[in-house]
Amino acid sequence: MSLENQIREAPSSVNQSSANGEIGLRSLEGLHGTVPLPPANSSFWRQLRAFAGPAFLVSVGYMDPGNWGTDLEAGAQFRYGLLWVVASASIMAIIMQIISARLGLVTGKDLAQACRDYYPKWTRLPNWLLCEIAIVACDLAEVLGSAVALNLLFHIPLLWAVIITAFDVLLLLTLQGMGMRLIEAIILVLVATIGACYFIEIFVLPHTSPDFLEMGSALLSPGFREDGMIPLAIAIIGATVMPHNLYLHSALVQTRKPNGEKERIGRAIRFNTIDTVIALSVAFLINSAILVLAAQVFHGQTSVTLRDGSVVSLTADSDPDWIRVAYLTLTPLLGVAAASILFGVALLASGQSSTITGTLAGQVVMEGFMQWRIRPWVRRLITRSLAIIPAILIIGLRGNGSITELLVLSQVVLAMQLPFAMFPLLHFTCSRKRMGRHVNGWFLTVAGWLSCLLITALAVYGLPETIKKVWAVIAR
C-alpha cells in the first residue's frame, strides 16, 4: 500500500501533508478524534450535545483570576462605566474563537501547525517561545488564584499556598486519563455553580439588585469619562482575549473528527459556532455579574474588613488586591463564612480548570511548532515551576500585598503576545487557498480584522503605561 493511501485510511495518526512535504504529528494525540458523533440526520439537540464542549473548556480562560481582578476593580472604581468594555471584549473574543475553531475544522491543523507549515522555518522557534512565555504568564494568574483559594479555604499562608500549587500536576494527570467528555462536564458544573450564585444575587435578592436602567445606559453609551478608565479598559481586554486559547480551540475541535467530508465540515462549523457563542456568552454574563456586584458592594467604600480581621483599603491610590476581597460579593447571599468557602472552591476550580487548559495549550504549541513530544506531567511541572518562581520571590520579599502586581505583570505579557496569534489566524482563514469554500465570509473578515487591529492599537497605546507598571513591580 502506498504512503498516500495509508495516510488517507489512517487520519487519526497523522496530519495531512504540510506545505513543505513533511508529515506532521497530531496534537493532543490521546484526545484526538475520541468523541463520537451522531449521524448527520440526528436531531438538532443530539448533535449539539455531541459537538458542545471545546468552547466551554476554552471559556474557562475567560473567567480566570485575571478577569475577576479587572472586573472587580472596574466595578469598584467606576461602577457600571466600563461594562461596555466587558461586552465589547467578549464580542471580540467570540469572533476570534469562532475563527479559530473554523481553522482547525477545515484544515485539520491547529494554529501552531498551520504557522509551522505555512510560514518560513525561521519563524518556528521565536513563535513557539512567545507562546510559551504567554502560557507561563497565564499560569502565573492561575497560581495566584489557586493560592488565594487555599488561603480562603484552609487559612494557609499565601507563600506556602503558592508552593502547594506545584502539585496540581497530580489532578491534571487524573482528569486527563478519564477522557475529554468528563473534563468538559466537570468544568461545566463548576462554571454553572458560580454563575447560579451571581444570578440569584442580581435577580432575586432585593438589596443587591442593580439599577437595570443604569446598566443599560452604561452599555449603550460607551466612553472614558473618568481618569484611569483607559488603562483599566486595556487590562480588561487583555485579560479577556487570551492568545493561547486561539491555539487551543483550533486543536480541541478536532476531538470531534468530521472525517474530511464537506457536509460534515459544514455541520461541525455550524455546531461549534453555536457552542462558542453559548459558552462565551455565559463567560460574559459571569464577568458582568462580578463587575455589577463589585459596583454594588465596593463602589463608594473606602475600605473593607476581611474574614481574618485585616482591613483592605479600596481607594485607587492603595492598589488593593481585588482577588482577595472578591468573595465579599457573595456575602449578601451566603454570609461571610459560606461566601468565603464557596468563592474559595469556585476560585480553586477556576485555577485548576485553567491549569488543565493551559497545559493542553502548551502541548499544542510545542507539538505544533516544534513537533516535540514530552509526557504531560513533565510539561506541567516545567510550566508551573516557571510560573511559581516569580510568585515565590515577590510574595516572599513583599508579602501578601503583591497579588495585584503579579496579576498586572501576567496580563501585560498576555496582551503583548496576542497580535502574534491573531494576525496569522486571520491570514490563514481569509485565504481561499487554505480554506477553500469555507473561507471567512465578509462579516467574519471585517469583524475579525477590526477586532485584531483594535486590540493591537490598544496594546500599543497602553505600552508606555504597562511598561511603567512592569518596572514598578520589578523595581519596587
Image (spheres, rainbow, N blue to C red):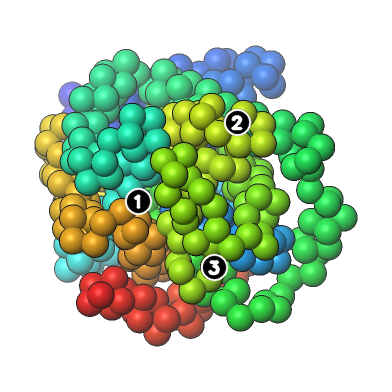
Do the numbered discs 3 and 1 sit on residues whose CB atoms are within 8 Å? no
Q: CA distance from mark 3 to mark 2?
A: 24 Å
Q: CA distance from mark 2 to mark 1?
A: 27 Å
Q: Can residue 259 be seen?
A: no
Q: Which mark is residue 335?
A: 2
Q: Could you tell me the amino acid type at mark 2?
A: Gly
Rendered residue at 70%/51% (across/down):
296
Q: Is residue 100 above or below residue 41?
A: below
Say whether disc 2 or disc 1 marks the residue closer to the N-terminus: 1
Q: Position of residue 421 (x, y in %)?
A: 38, 61
Q: Could you tell me the amino acid type at mark 3?
A: Thr
Q: Which mark is residue 315?
A: 3
Asked where in the image residue 2 lies, by quadrant, the reply is top left
For discs 2 and 1, the disc positioned in front in the rendered view: 2
Q: In what quadrant of the picture does the C terminus appear?
A: bottom left
Query: Would you call the spot at circle 2 few (<14 residues within 10 Å), some (14-19), or many (20 or more)?
Result: few
- Left or right: 222 in relation to 115: right
Q: Position of residue 278 (x, y in %)?
A: 64, 37
Q: Which mark is residue 447?
A: none
Q: Could you tell me the amino acid type at mark 1?
A: Ala
Rendered residue at 41%/18% (across/down):
182
Task: State how many labels appear.
Answer: 3
Q: Position of residue 206 (x, y in %)?
A: 81, 37
Which secondary structure, mark 3?
Answer: loop
Q: Which mark is residue 141?
A: 1
Which secondary structure, mark 1?
Answer: helix
For discs 3 and 1, the disc positioned in front in the rendered view: 3
Rendered residue at 51%/78% (across/down):
457
Asked where in the image residue 222 lies, by quadrant, the reply is bottom right
Which secondary structure, mark 2?
Answer: loop
